[in-house]
Structure formats: C-alpha cells, structure tokens
Image: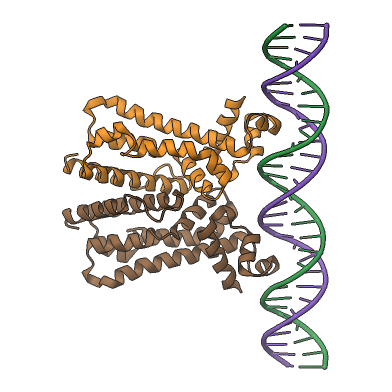
Chain colours: A brown, B orange, C purple, D green
DNA sequence: ACATAAACATACATTGGTGTATGTATGTAT
DNA sequence: ATACATACATACACCAATGTATGTTTATGT
C-alpha cells in the first residue's frame, strides 16, 4: 500500500504538477483514504519526498543504463545522448518543481535533503568517481560537462513551461552543437 | 495604490517565492487591506501577472542596456555578459516559479499570456529583429545563441534551488567556455 | 454645501487543504 | 479461540487561503 501511495504521488507530480498534488488528490488516485496515507507517512511532505526519490532513481537508472550500453568505449556523443535521455525525460519536470517548492517549505526540504544530496552527488564530478573518471580530471572537460548539464537543465525547464510541447524547436540544434564542440575539443 | 500593490507582490515573489506569495502576505507588505487589492484587481492572479510583468520589464531593460553600452561594435563576449546580466539576475527566479505554476493554473495562465508572449518574442531570433541582426541569419550563430540561453537558464534554475548561494561554483567556468566557443567560431 | 464616484477598510462566507481521533477490518502469534 | 498489532476507513477539527458584501473615508464635480 505504501508503494501504491508513492506511485500515485509520483504520477500526480508528473501529470498535474506539484501545485495540484494534494493529499486528497493522491488518495483519490491511489484508491485509499487519508487514514491510510497518514498511517504510512508521518506527514504529506514525507510522501512527496518518497515520490520524488522514485523519480530521481528512475532518472539515475537511465543515466547508468546509457553508460553501461557503451562501457569503456564511451564517446562524448554517447555521453551527451545518455545525459539528455535522463534530463530530457518529462519526469524531470517533477524534480524541478519540487526542488523549487522546497526552497520555501522547511518540512519538504528536510524530507528531501538526502534525495537532493544523492542526486547532486551523482551529477558532481567531485563526488561521482565514475563521472570523474569519464572526465579524467581535465578542467576543460569539466567545464564542458557543466555547460552541457546546464543547457540540458535549461531545456528541461523550457519543456516544462511550454504547454503541449513534447520538445522544443531547438533541441536537436543544441544537442548537435554540444556534440560538435565536444568532438572539436577532443573530449 | 495599484503600483504599491504590484511592487509588494513583486518583492514578495523575489524574496519568499511564489508559494508564500498570498493575497494576505502581499497586503501586509503593501500596508493595505484586501478590500483595496480587490478594488484594483479582479482577482489575485491578475495582480501576480502584473507583478511578473514588472519583473520581466526589468530584465528586458537590463538586456537592452547591455546592448546599448556597445552599439554596433557589439562583440560576442559582450553579448554573453549582457545576457548573463539579465538571466543571472536573482529576480529571474520569480519568472521561473510563476511560469511553472501557471502550467496548471488556468486563471494565472490567462493573465500571463501577453507577458509570456512578449518575453518569449524578445528571446526568439525569429521575432526579435535586433537579435536577428546580431545573429545575421547564421544558423550556427543561432544554435550557439540557443545553447547559451539554455545554459544560462539552467544556471539560473540552479541558483534558484540552491539555498543561500549567490552564485554557483561553476558559473565563471561555463560563461568563460561559452566565450571561448563563441570566439573560436568567429561569432 | 451637496451629490457622486472612487478608494479604501472591515467583517464575513466559502472552500480546500492538512492532519487528528476514533472505529473497523484484517493478519499474526499464542 | 483470544489477544494484539497492523492497516485501513470514517468523521471531525482546524487553519489558511481567496473572494464577497457592506461600510466608511476621501476625492471630485457641480
């Protein structure tokens, strides 16, 4: 049942956004009452944090799968595609929304802290040894990686705020340019 | 009085975020009652839209001022600095938050539509003739512009979700890399 | 001075949200 | 079979939000 609530909260976040994801709505979606919700979670924020953790795990898994597809023969273009596979996923919108909301909600923030830390570490060349190995301690590679990530996050946000749009008009151009730059720099 | 309410709403959005910007809070900040608010605005969303318009006008003005500083001698590094001056402004966080919130709030969306359209046009090489002139119809320049904007928006979001941080650790590296790339491509 | 409109304040209504208290059903161990 | 724990449902409490109705003050025109 706990898993059912988490799944319902996740689906709600992704489908109707943070603002419309309420205890009432999640319970309706899961087909249980709030009594059950509050039996399993101390408060609603705790459920939200668990749901977001699911979202982040899913995205992390996509990132890991992309790197596994190529193993030690990983090329920069594969790395770019892999990261865009994760960040460009519509589910990333939930990450953006909840993280922003947590900025002014101490209860939500405290529940999210481990999730945020884990995900941030995964994205940080300082903390993620696999990623650090990919970048080989090369400051130019690290700067490029940062540029790539920021551009992808920017595009994810653009998708999140654009009604009905499954993709932005310039996605391919930006991804293509990132690949050109990566190749030109011998990364 | 109307202006006072708009200024209070804008300040609230920037300071405590969208989630804590309520009619009660804005009125307290403006030193008036809700009777006055609802006299001047049909509903609260209308006030929020007006406040966000103010924010967007401020950012647009910063972008315009940057281009005026250099006139026809505008170089790519100046363009990058100018854009980062606008997008990197902490006020841009309010833009992100409200746009995201509007995705699932029809009332807010309808009030924001003209603001969004105007701002999006300003950022689009298709709609902004000055920007189009800067880019000279060069598809590589346009792709680079898009990459730059997305990276800046990504960093603005990063700043928005990072507590206490006035800047990200890798801002200078990303901006520096963008400049290098722009120069290397003869843009 | 009076009448009217605009601008504001106050009090109230309604709604929708989170969470609590209590009850009931189900599962498990003895 | 009984006792207890767990998992769920129901009813209720409380609060904070937006918005409405009404009253009062201020500004403006004649």
Q: Is residue D17 above or below residue C10?
A: below
Q: Is residue B27 visible?
A: yes
Q: Is residue A15 left or right of residue A127?
A: right
Going 54% across and 33% down the picture, which residue do you hit? B50
Q: Quadrant of the N terminus of chain B?
A: top right
Q: Position of residue A41 (x, y in %)?
A: 63, 66
Q: Quadrant of the C terminus of chain B?
A: top left
Q: Is residue B28 left or right of residue A19?
A: right
Q: Position of residue A159 (x, y in %)?
A: 41, 52
Q: Nearer the viewer, residue A27 or D15?
A: A27
Residue B36 sits in which quadrant?
top right
Q: Is residue A85 left or right of residue D28?
A: left
Q: Position of residue A165 (x, y in %)?
A: 42, 53
Q: Nearer the viewer, residue B139 or B168?
A: B139
Q: Position of residue A80 (x, y in %)?
A: 28, 59
Q: Is residue B168 visible?
A: no
């Amino acid at each position: 049942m706990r898993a059912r609530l988490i799944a319902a909260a996740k689906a709600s976040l992704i489908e109707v956004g943070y603002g419309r994801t309420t205890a009432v709505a999640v319970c309706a979606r899961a087909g249980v009452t709030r009594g059950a919700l509050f039996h399993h979670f101390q408060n609603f924020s705790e459920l939200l944090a668990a749901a977001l953790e699911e979202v982040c795990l899913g995205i992390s898994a996509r990132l890991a799968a992309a790197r596994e597809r190529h193993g030690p023969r990983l090329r920069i273009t594969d790395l770019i595609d892999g990261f865009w596979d994760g960040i460009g996923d519509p589910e990333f919108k939930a990450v953006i929304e909840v993280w922003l909301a947590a900025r002014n909600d101490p209860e939500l923030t405290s529940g999210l802290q481990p999730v945020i830390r884990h995900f941030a570490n995964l994205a940080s060349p300082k903390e993620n040894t696999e990623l650090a190995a990919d970048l080989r301690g090369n400051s130019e590679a690290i700067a490029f990686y940062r540029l790539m990530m920021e551009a992808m996050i920017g595009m994810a946000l653009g998708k999140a705020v654009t009604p009905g749009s499954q993709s932005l008009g310039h996605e391919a151009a930006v991804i293509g340019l990132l690949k050109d730059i990566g190749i030109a720099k011998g990364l």
